[in-house]
Amino acid sequence: MPRSPAPIRSGRDEPLGFVIASVGHAAASAFVAALAETGLHPRHFAVLRELRAGEARSQQQLAHALGIPASRVVGLLDDLVGRGYVARRESPADRRVKLVTLLDTGREVLDQLIVLAGRSEARVTAGLSEADKSELRRLLGIVYDNVAIEEDGVRARVW
């Protein structure tokens, strides 16, 4: 019989980094579970969200914006192209550069993923008022800005 994980103590002696990491892991797991019915991962969501403005982005730009290796972006894009959600083409200025755009089907899927993400968010923030949620976003934004750049100057991975 699997054991349930130990609860996070809310005492002042618990290192805040551990609490944030534990909550982040649990929230990420809830997000993965929310998207599971689509067969997509939050990394797919991150790519689609990054393309939603409508302008073509290079694979390198996507990798940099998401803080993940270009090789991983290629794999994600291969999957999204195969599903008909994004298109990839050569740049007219440089044939070595691949430009990626979000297709209408990808925008529809992104809209569906946003609904699913909202359900996940409702689970994660149950019991919080709108003011609490706003304050939590503000505080997490500060924490993220404090740690978003790693020591080597590379942006921390978004997902």
Image (spheres, rainbow, N blue to C red):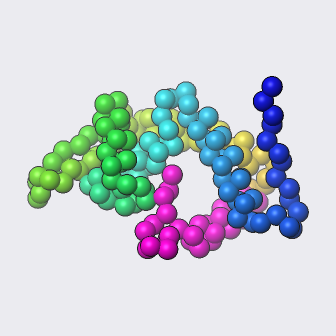
Task: Please tell me in which quadrant of the rendered image residue 142 appears.
Answer: bottom right
The correct choice, above or below, for 155 with respect to 112 in the image is below
**Residue 149 position within the rendered picture, expressed as x and y whole percent measured from the top left:** 50, 71
Residue at 69% of width from left, 46% of height from top? 26
Which quarter of the figure is the N terminus placed in? top right
Q: How many numbered discs sit on the rendered protein? A: 0
> Which stretch did the figure color magenta?
131-159
Looking at the image, which is closer to me, 16 or 107? 16
The correct choice, above or below, for 83 with respect to 151 in the image is above
Residue ranking furthest to the right: 11
Quick check: 136 left or right of 144? right
**Residue 151 position within the rendered picture, expressed as x and y whole percent measured from the top left:** 49, 74
**Residue 100 appears in view:** yes
The stretch drawn in magenta includes residue 148: yes
The stretch drawn in magenta includes residue 134: yes
**Residue 5 position within the rendered picture, expressed as x and y whole percent measured from the top left:** 79, 42
The correct choice, above or below, for 10 with respect to 124 in the image is below
**Residue 33 position within the rendered picture, expressed as x and y whole percent measured from the top left:** 61, 34
Residue at 41% of width from left, 47% of height from top? 47
Quick check: 100 left or right of 154? left
Residue at 14% of width from left, 53% of height from top? 96
**Residue 55 appears in view:** no
Residue at 51% of width from left, 52% of height from top? 159
Looking at the image, which is closer to me, 149 or 86? 149
Residue ranking furthest to the front: 1
Quick check: 108 left or right of 141? left
